[in-house]
Image (cartoon, helix red, strand yellow):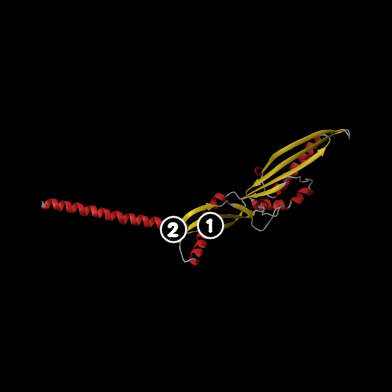
């Protein structure tokens, strides 16, 4: 009888311990859930900015010129002469044949009944594409020499500067923008008597490339492609928990 009583007493104690442990665990989970709920309501949204000055690593100069006359043969010969002048001009700056390409030619012919004569216009496009951006910029600055040699530049002639290594600097810039955002959140938390916790939600803005030195386009906005000296910019928006 004593042994059975002792066994029952042991089972009772074990059951009571399990119930007590369940109550404690339930209370902890409830308290932790309430704490998390409070944390979810306590957050701050800040933006982090990162900027990087870069130099374009690709220059593309499109040169368009034309010749007009009454006979196809002489007009084509005149265009060919202008093409030789363009190539000679660029080679004086050290560019090789591999840097140059004929990217387009168009021929427009019609008979002018009022003048009773044929009209022929040939338009030729030559493109310089080079990684030597500074040398291309120097050549572009002397395009008046090209005009003086008899090559009148048509609409569509322009230089475009491109920065093609954006993917190489993206990770560092995102990390910098995140640090700046956390710093701003830290100041807010300090002022409100709290501390910054983990990230609740983050949104990465798009990367933009603008002119570094305040160059503007015709509409008053930054025109990155007109200058080899550019600025890359990204803004991240991050929600931080406040502890």
Instruction: Look at the image and tell me in which quarter the C terminus lies.
Output: bottom left
Q: Position of residue 197 (x, y in %)?
A: 45, 59
For the residue labelled by badge 2, is the local secondary structure a helix, a strand or a loop? helix
- In the image, taking residue 185 as reference, residue 58 lies left or right, namely right
Q: Please state which of residues 106 and 210 is positioned toward the viewer in this rendering.
A: 210
Q: Nearer the viewer, mark 1 or mark 2?
A: 2
Q: Please state which of residues 236 and 41 is positioned toward the viewer in this rendering.
A: 41
Residue 105 vs 146, above or below: the answer is above
Kindly indicate the quadrant of the structure image that contains residue 26. Answer: bottom left
- In the image, taking residue 82 as reference, residue 176 lies left or right, namely left
Q: Position of residue 150 (x, y in %)?
A: 79, 46
- In the image, taking residue 204 as reference, residue 132 lies left or right, namely right
**What residue appears at the point 76 percent right and 43 percent down from the top-left corner?**
65
Q: Position of residue 85 (x, y in %)?
A: 75, 44
The numbered mark, 1 or 2, whose residue comes first in the sequence reads: 2
Q: In this view, which residue lies farthest toward the right? A: 115
The answer for how far apart the CA atoms under marks 1 and 2 are is 27 Å
Q: Which mark is residue 38?
A: 2
- In the image, taking residue 152 as reference, residue 93 lies left or right, namely left
Q: Which mark is residue 105?
A: none
**What residue appears at the point 43 percent right and 56 percent down from the top-left corner?**
37
**What residue appears at the point 77 percent right and 38 percent down from the top-left corner?**
122
Kindly indicate the quadrant of the structure image that contains residue 51. Answer: bottom right
Circle 1 sits on which residue?
177
Q: In this view, which residue lies farthest toward the left? A: 1
Q: Could you classify mark 2 by the number of other residues whose Cα lies within 10 Å: few (under 14), some (14-19), or many (20 or more)?
A: some
**What residue appears at the point 19 percent right and 51 percent down from the top-left corner?**
11
- Determine whether label 1 and label 2 are within 8 Å by CB: no
For the residue labelled by badge 1, is the local secondary structure a helix, a strand or a loop? helix
Q: Position of residue 24 (x, y in %)?
A: 31, 57
Any part of residue 238 in sight: yes
Q: Could you classify mark 1 by the number of other residues whose Cα lies within 10 Å: few (under 14), some (14-19), or many (20 or more)?
A: many
């Amino acid at each position: 009888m004593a042994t059975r009583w002792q066994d029952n007493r042991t089972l009772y104690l074990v059951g009571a311990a399990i119930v007590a442990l369940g109550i404690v665990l339930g209370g902890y989970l409830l308290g932790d859930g309430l704490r998390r709920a409070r944390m979810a309501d306590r957050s701050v949204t800040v933006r982090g900015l990162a900027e990087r000055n870069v130099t374009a690593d690709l220059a593309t100069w499109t040169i368009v010129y034309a010749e007009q006359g009454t006979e196809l043969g002489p007009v084509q010969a005149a265009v060919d002469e202008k093409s030789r002048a363009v190539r000679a001009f660029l080679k004086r700056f050290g560019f090789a044949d591999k840097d140059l390409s004929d990217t387009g030619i168009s021929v427009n012919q019609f008979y002018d009944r009022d003048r009773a004569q044929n009209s022929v216009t040939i338009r030729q496009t030559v493109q310089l594409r080079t990684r030597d951006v500074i040398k291309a910029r120097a050549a572009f600055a002397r395009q008046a020499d090209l005009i003086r040699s008899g090559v009148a530049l048509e609409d569509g002639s322009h230089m475009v500067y491109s920065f093609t290594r954006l993917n190489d600097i993206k990770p560092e810039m995102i990390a910098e923008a995140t640090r700046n955002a956390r710093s701003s959140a830290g100041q807010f938390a300090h002022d409100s008597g709290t501390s910054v916790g983990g990230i609740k939600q983050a949104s990465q803005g798009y990367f933009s490339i603008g002119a570094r030195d305040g160059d503007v386009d015709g509409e008053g906005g930054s025109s990155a492609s007109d200058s080899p000296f550019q600025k890359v910019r990204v803004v991240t928006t991050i929600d931080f928990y406040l502890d």
